[in-house]
Image (cartoon, rainbow, N blue to C red):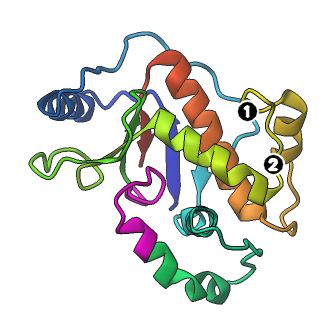
C-alpha cells in the first residue's frame, strides 16, 4: 500500500462534503463535470507514504534558510524531524499541513491551508490545501533539488523529461519523484479546475 495521487475523482459524496465545507469558509468551488487534464504517463501516481516526508524536509530547510543536503537514510530524515514539526506548527505550508494518506488540494488560491475542524466528513482530518499554494511551494523547493524552472515559473519539457527519469540512486531521487508527481497534479488541477485527491 502507498499514497495514490489523483486529479479528478469519482468520489461524489466526498467531493460534495468538501464543497459544502469550503462554502462554509466563503470559498466557492465544485468539481467540474469535464474530464481532467491528462497527466504525463511517466509521473508516479503511487508513492510510498514515507516519500512525502523527504520532500517536506526539503521544504522546512528551504523556508528556514538552511542548507539542504541529501537525506539518504531514515536516520538522516529523523535528524531534522524537530525542524519539520516546528515548521508544520506554523500552519502556513500547504505541503506540510496535509495528511499523508487522504484529503484534498483544490484549485483556489488561498494563502494558508484550511483546517475544517467542524467538518469531520472531509477526508484528511479536514486539512485542505490550495493547488496554487502547493505549486508556489514546489517552486521554492525546486532550486534545492537541482530542478531548473523557466523564468515564468513553468517546468520546461526537457527538464520534465530529465526529472521524470531520475536514477534511483541519485541525490534527492525520492524528493524529486514526489516533487514531480505533485507538480504534475497541480498543473492538471489548476488547468482543469479539479481537486487533487490523496488516497
Would residue 184 be counted in the magenta stretch?
A: no
- The picture places residue 93, in percent across and down from the top left corner, at 44, 54
Q: Name the residue under label 2.
A: 147
Q: Indicate the position of residue 103 as horizontal and vertical percent values.
A: 34, 47
Dot 2 or dot 1: first in sequence order is 1
Residue 89 within the magenta-colored segment of the rendering: yes
Quarter occupied by residue 61: bottom right
Residue at horizontal 36%, vertical 35%?
110
Residue drawn at 34 percent across, 59 percent down: 91
Q: Which residue lies furthest to the left in this view?
A: 118
The answer to whether 120 appears left or right of 53 in the picture is left
**Is residue 101 rendered to the left or right of residue 186?**
left
Which residues are drawn in magenta? 86-101
> How far separated are the C-alphas under marks 2 and 1?
20 Å
Q: How crowded is mark 2: few (under 14 residues within 10 Å), some or many (20 or more)?
A: some
Q: Residue 41: which disc?
A: 1
Q: Residues within 10 Å of mark 1 (few under 14, many from 20)?
A: few
Outermost residue on the top side: it is 34
Residue 145 makes an appearance in the image: yes
Compared with 130, 168 (above or below) is: below
List x then y, in percent, for residue 164. 81, 44
Residue 93 higher or lower than 155, as above or below:
below
Per the image, label 1 sits on a secondary structure element best described as loop
Which of these two is toward me, 9 or 175?
A: 175
Amino acid at each position: 500500500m502507498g499514497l495514490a495521487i489523483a486529479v479528478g475523482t469519482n468520489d461524489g459524496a466526498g467531493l460534495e462534503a468538501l464543497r459544502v465545507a469550503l462554502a462554509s469558509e466563503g470559498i466557492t468551488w465544485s468539481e467540474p463535470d469535464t474530464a481532467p487534464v491528462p497527466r504525463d504517463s511517466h509521473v508516479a501516481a503511487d508513492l510510498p507514504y514515507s516519500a512525502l516526508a523527504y520532500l517536506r524536509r526539503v521544504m522546512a530547510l528551504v523556508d528556514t534558510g538552511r542548507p539542504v543536503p541529501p537525506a539518504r537514510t531514515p536516520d538522516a530524515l529523523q535528524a531534522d524531524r524537530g525542524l519539520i514539526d516546528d515548521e508544520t506548527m506554523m500552519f502556513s505550508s500547504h505541503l506540510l499541513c496535509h495528511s499523508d494518506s487522504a484529503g484534498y488540494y483544490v484549485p483556489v488560491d488561498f494563502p494558508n491551508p484550511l483546517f475544517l475542524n467542524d467538518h469531520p466528513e472531509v477526508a484528511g482530518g479536514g486539512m485542505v490545501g490550495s493547488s496554487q499554494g502547493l505549486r508556489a511551494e514546489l517552486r521554492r523547493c525546486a532550486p534545492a533539488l537541482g530542478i531548473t524552472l523557466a523564468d515564468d515559473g513553468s517546468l520546461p519539457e526537457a527538464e520534465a523529461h530529465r526529472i521524470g527519469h531520475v536514477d534511483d540512486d541519485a541525490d534527492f531521487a525520492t524528493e524529486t519523484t514526489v516533487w514531480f508527481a505533485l507538480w504534475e497534479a497541480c498543473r492538471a488541477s489548476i488547468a482543469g479546475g479539479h481537486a487533487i485527491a490523496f488516497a
